[in-house]
């Protein structure tokens, strides 16, 4: 059976552009289009699509209301199509909190690579089509999968509180996951945190600002030469590879941003970041691999483990896509598999920091 998609956008040009992107791929068919939220809700009920692509801003019922309605009625996976603006980013993050599964940048921006957007959209449609409910009658609950332990990591002998830096990698589902972890950390969290979240240019700064406004620790988008400080989380800017390095003649560590050398599938890359943090901090590295498609992080986390660091992995039941954490667990690189809402407390436990449970 082909994958069926409902395309929602108030622009006829954009509906046509997204339809052409999708139908150029064998096995995907656009079964309908909608011009606004009201029409989207109606057609989602009538057509039973496997996936919906949803414009963020539309006249009348906008994307947020439509996401809320469709998620409540049928649970069909919704991929947001977001303008590369501050307002577009903020609305997209809110849509993810309301139930949308992921997003892509709107392909009409002059500095967006259309072929990259098409490839990303097709990959996400294929992944999320497997999650689509069979009918509108009931939303199927996410099935809890047992932790992968084909090659379990050796039990850690690390002394709690001896870590120096936290490295977090995530992709699909990451903005919501980070919003459950970072704001839960106390103001006195003792370590710097470095984060790679796969997302297009224009979204990492709004993400940092959004997390900063709801967190007790400071959250910023990284810049070249920035010094890592305890109780501060640094998000790698989209389109740049983030590495860490010790400053000459000092115990301070700074951020080094660079262009990709063409060998990484993702920019920024979890592999590049975690391998660099491991090289800088050695056994003082505490890493977490969260929800996301693919296997970015496996190479870097192997460096973490080779140097005596510790790795926490998000479990299948709470991951939007159990790809990156699964790949790391199957490679024997995860010391502890945890549900999303237990990760903040685990980071506190491992750093001897008091955690106030809400």
Image (cartoon, rainbow, N blue to C red):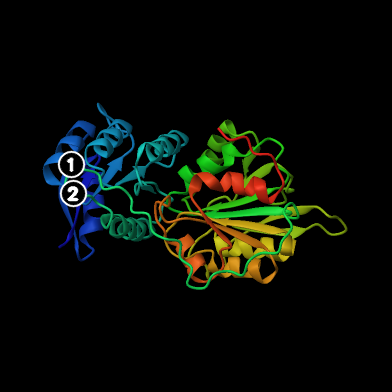
Q: Nearer the viewer, residue 57 or 14?
A: 57
Report the side of 241 relative to 115 (left or right): right
Query: On the image, numbered disc 1 is attached to which residue?
Result: 44
Mark 1 closeness class: few <14, some 14–19, many ≥20 residues within 10 Å: many
Report the side of 15 relative to 101 (left or right): left
Report the side of 112 relative to 72 (left or right): right
The percent position of residue 91, horizontal first and vertical second, equals: 40, 34
Q: Residue at x 17, y 42 (%)?
A: 137
Q: Is residue 172 above or below residue 189?
A: below
Query: On the image, numbered disc 2 is attached to which residue?
Result: 49
Task: Report, in whole angstroms, how far the alpha carbon at label 1 lies from the one at label 2.
Answer: 6 Å
The percent position of residue 222, horizontal first and vertical second, equals: 63, 47
Occupied quadrant, residue 181: top right
Occupied quadrant, residue 310: bottom right
Mark 2 closeness class: few <14, some 14–19, many ≥20 residues within 10 Å: many
The percent position of residue 324, horizontal first and vertical second, equals: 47, 61
């Amino acid at each position: 059976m082909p994958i069926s998609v409902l395309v929602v956008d108030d622009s006829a040009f954009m509906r046509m552009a997204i339809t052409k992107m999708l139908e150029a791929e064998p096995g995907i068919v656009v079964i309908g289009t909608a011009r606004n939220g009201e029409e989207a809700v109606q057609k989602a009920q009538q057509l039973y699509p496997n996936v919906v692509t949803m414009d963020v801003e539309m006249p009348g019922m906008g994307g947020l209301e439509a996401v809320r309605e469709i998620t409540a009625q049928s649970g069909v996976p919704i991929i947001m199509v977001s303008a590369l603006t501050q307002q577009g980013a903020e609305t997209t993050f809110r849509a993810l909190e309301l139930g949308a599964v992921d997003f892509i940048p709107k392909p009409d921006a002059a500095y967006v690579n259309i072929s990259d957007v098409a490839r990303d959209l097709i990959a996400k449609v294929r992944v999320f089509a497997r999650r689509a409910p069979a009918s509108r009658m009931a939303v199927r609950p996410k099935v809890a999968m047992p932790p992968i332990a084909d090659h379990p990591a050796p039990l850690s002998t690390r002394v709690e509180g001896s870590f120096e830096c936290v490295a977090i990698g995530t992709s699909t589902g990451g903005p919501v996951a980070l919003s459950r972890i970072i704001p839960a950390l106390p103001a006195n969290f003792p370590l710097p945190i470095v984060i790679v979240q796969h997302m297009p240019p224009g979204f990492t700064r709004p993400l940092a600002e959004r997390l900063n406004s709801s967190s007790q620790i400071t959250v910023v988008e990284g810049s070249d030469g920035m010094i890592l400080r305890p109780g501060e989380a640094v998000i790698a800017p989209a389109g740049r590879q983030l590495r860490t390095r010790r400053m000459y003649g000092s115990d301070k560590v700074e951020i080094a941003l660079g262009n990709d050398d063409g060998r990484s599938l993702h920019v920024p890359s979890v592999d590049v970041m975690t391998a660099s943090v491991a090289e800088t901090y050695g056994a003082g590295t505490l890493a977490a691999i969260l929800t996301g498609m693919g296997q970015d992080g496996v190479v870097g986390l192997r460096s973490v483990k080779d140097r005596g660091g510790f790795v926490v992995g998000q479990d299948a039941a709470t991951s939007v896509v159990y790809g990156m954490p699964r790949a790391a667990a199957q490679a024997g690189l995860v010391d502890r598999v945890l549900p999303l809402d237990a990760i903040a407390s685990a980071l506190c436990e491992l750093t001897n920091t008091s955690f106030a449970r809400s």
